[in-house]
Amino acid sequence: MSDAAANAAQIENWNLRTGEIWVRFQPRLDAQISPLGEQAMTALAPAAGERVLDIGCGCGQTSVNLATRVAPGGAVLGVDVSEPMLGLARSRPRPAGAAPLDFRRADAQVEDLGAGAFDAVFSRFGVMFFADPSAAFANIRAALRPGGRLSFVCWRAMALNPMMTAPLEAARALLPPLPPADPLAPGPFAFADAARVRGILGAAGFTDIVISPFDADLVGGTLEEAVELSLFVGPLATVLRDNPQLREPVTNAVRETWRARLKDGVVVIPAAVWIVTATNA
Ligand SMILES: C[S@@+](CC[C@H](N)C(=O)[O-])C[C@H]1O[C@@H](n2cnc3c(N)ncnc32)[C@H](O)[C@@H]1O
């Protein structure tokens, strides 16, 4: 497979359906997952003057946050394969005093990101989509100076994350039989197995690998907001895209499952992630 074709299916997906959905729901998705990104950013501890690379930066919230943390004197580059998401990232207001921030369309698995050009690499859920993760992390490591740091957040097992499972389970009786998922295929849960992640980072040449569980209660918005998001983002959304006639009955089932998690007017959803740090020794 040529370098250009390595991640063709994911690149198409993030430029069409999924990318457009992330742009449409960007404020809500940012609000929901930002506590998880913040935890990985705290672990990275970006300092003033540092150059930071944000992998799979998407619509750019974390890149902007990094740019405020490395000011004065630092710089941030966000890379992503999704043109619609990068478009939104480029249009975001930059806080006064933030360090220079640039965005570039690039497949982080194969494209030259700048040899030793960065002090630190960050990602919020942007590193689980590579066809060849070891090659991708070797390429990412090449962009770090000696001693440079890596920190990212990725999902633990799908079964631990009701944000994905609860809508699917609620609707199960209404859905056609679903094919079993390949746990190693590129996708949100490709890094659920910590031993696999450790192996990938080790094979790519990283050292000081630390993989820590982190749990948080996420705010899924009002009941209707949580229902809407479930119909457009996640595994149930994928099924509904192919079976649009099921949308109405499924909506009612999903509403009941989220109603059970209402607290003070918002849906509260537990999340389980890994915070992963490593060094380019
Ligand atoms: C789940 S989204 C996360 C986006 C963003 N980091 C956030 O937290 O809002 C995953 C992102 O990874 C990007 N991505 C997938 N494969 C990639 C690749 N090979 N190189 C760079 N970015 C990639 C997608 O386009 C998408 O923006």
Image (cartoon, helix red, strand yellow):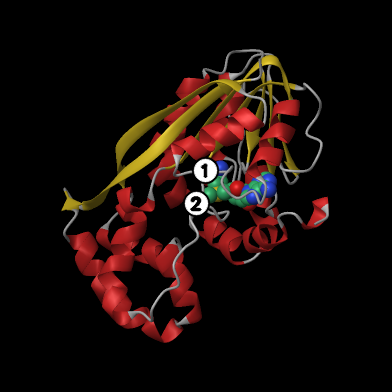
Q: For the residue labelled by badge 1, is the local secondary structure a helix, a strand or a loop?
A: loop
Residue 267 pos. (x, y %): 25, 53
Residue toward you, 124 or 188: 188
Residue 149, image x, y percentages: 60, 20
Whole-number angstrom distance, CA of label 1 to CA of label 2: 7 Å
Whole-percent x, y for residue 87 in the image: 68, 51
Looking at the image, is 36 positioned above or below residue 32?
Answer: above
Tag 1 residue: 125
- The residue where tag 2 is placed is 188
For residue 276, say whether it is visible.
yes
Quarter of the figure with the C terminus:
top right
- Up-down relation of residue 205 to residue 266 (above or below): above
Give the left or right position of residue 160, taking residue 3 as reference.
left
Observer-nearest of 70 and 133? 133
Instruction: Please tell me how crowded label 2 is: few (under 14), some (14-19), or many (20+) other residues with Cα within 10 Å.
Output: many
In which quadrant of the rendered image does the N terminus lie? bottom right
Mark 1 residue CB less than 8 A from any atom of ligand 1: yes
Q: Is residue 167 left or right of residue 39?
A: left
Indicate yes or no: mark 2 CB to ligand 1 under 8 Å: yes
**Looking at the picture, which amino acid does disc 2 mark?**
Pro
Q: Is residue 161 left or right of residue 44?
A: left
Q: Earlier in the sequence, mark 1 or mark 2?
A: 1
Contact check, label 1 and label 2, Cβ < 8 Å: yes
